[in-house]
Amino acid sequence: MRNKLKNFGFTSNKKIPVDKFLEKALYEPRVGYYNNRFPFGKDGDFVTSPTISNLFSEILAIWIISAWEKFERPKIFNLVELGPGDGSLIKILIQTFRKFPEFNKSVKIFLYEKSDFLIDIQKKKIQKKQINWIKNYNTIKKGPVIFFGNEFFDAIPIKQFTVKNKKFLEKCYFFNKKGLIETYKKALPSDVSFVKSFDTLKNQNFIEYPKLGFYELNKIIKKISALSGGILLIDYGYLKPFNGNTLQTVMRNKKIQMSDLYNHIGKADVTYLVNFNLLKEFFKKKNLKVKNIVTQKFFLETMGIIERAKIIEKKMNDRQRKSMFITLKRLLHKDSMGELFKVIFSYSSKKNNFLGFD
């Protein structure tokens, strides 16, 4: 086990902040979770909305086209998927875009992916010459740009702090013979200052702070502010204040204890629940507008997913029809993904009437 830990760059009995630990566990070249295994689908570790039903992807395609119309149908319209996963979502988007020739001619598609392992998987699924795989946004220089990500933000490692007697302590891990151990150290003054600047995080004694996520968003916001456009994020998370640890470890579609990650490092996914009000406050601090945060159920139903299903079912047999409505229920039901998943759209534009949020 010690040799395996060394492959991740870990040293026994050395304190590692949560975000640094997760970054190595998830993204370390060759051995990190997203760089060594196929995690998607029923045979993987988790399922996502695009792998559950093509209807999700079709509706998102329609929303993207409607956004293009709100930007007055520009001849160049940049579209960036953040963390494309196995490519299921963008594959259906491309198929849908072909039905709208004027839009299809104007759209330039970029896939932002950190994992070379997943890029290879995506390229096998998406055989389209016009797609550009990128690891930064420098090549996007002209025309409005829409960034979108489904379960993107939850996969970016977070920092965790506890507050005792008004003192901030940063949560860390270290390894010894007993396994993965939790511990704390004095938080950096710069992190404390930044956390204190958010009203959303006040009066909490346990704080989750997406420092790396905000760093990523800053790069995106810079591009949006320069070219106009926006960012659409769909993820599991919460709106009501939550004063606790939301980190969760998933393996083979089942949750496992964080302490068990010692034995499964590189083989299990680690995510957290996104604080959507914190995201909203962050976007507003950057002078972007923010639409109402809505549930996935509200967004998909407002965009017409049920009506679309009723049209499609006319061409289906009983088995196909039953299967479609089972997956639709999973996307929309309050006890499944419908309420847990939220949708936020932040943008820089004089237009305000983007669909799906009112």
Image: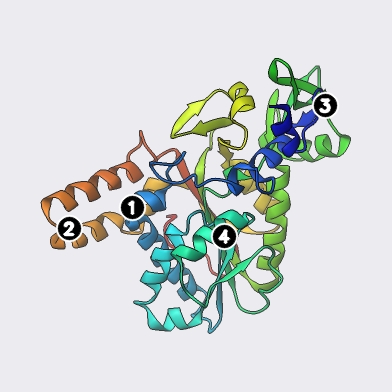
**Which is nearer the N-term, disc 3 or disc 1?**
3
Find residue 306 and report its image quarter: bottom left
Q: Amino acid at mark 3?
A: Lys
Specify the label residue 53 is tagged with. Answer: 1
Camera-nearest label, 4 or 2: 4
Where residue 81 appears, x then y in whole percent?
A: 54, 61
Q: Circles 3 and 1: CB distance less than 8 Å?
A: no
Is residue 267 shown above or below 78?
above
The secondary structure type at the circle numbered 3 is loop
Camera-nearest label, 3 or 2: 3
Number of residues whose C-alpha sits closer than 10 Å to that of mark 3, classed few (under 14), some (14–19) or many (20 or more): few
Label 2, label 1: how many angstroms apart (C-alpha)?
Answer: 14 Å
Q: Circles 3 and 2: CB distance less than 8 Å?
A: no
Most foreground residue, 302 or 90: 90
Q: Is residue 77 left or right of residue 158?
A: left
Q: Amino acid at mark 4?
A: Ile
Specify the label residue 132 is tagged with. Answer: none
Residue at the spot of label 3: 14
Specify the label residue 119 is tagged with. Answer: 4
Q: Amino acid at mark 2?
A: Glu
Most foreground residue, 358 or 5: 5
Specify the label residue 313 is tagged with. Answer: 2
**Which is nearer the N-term, disc 3 or disc 2?**
3
Mark yes or no: residue 19 visible.
yes
The secondary structure type at the circle numbered 1 is loop
Q: Circles 4 and 2: CB distance less than 8 Å?
A: no
Q: Is residue 159 left or right of residue 336?
A: right
Q: How many marks?
A: 4
Residue at x 70% of width, y 49% of height: 214
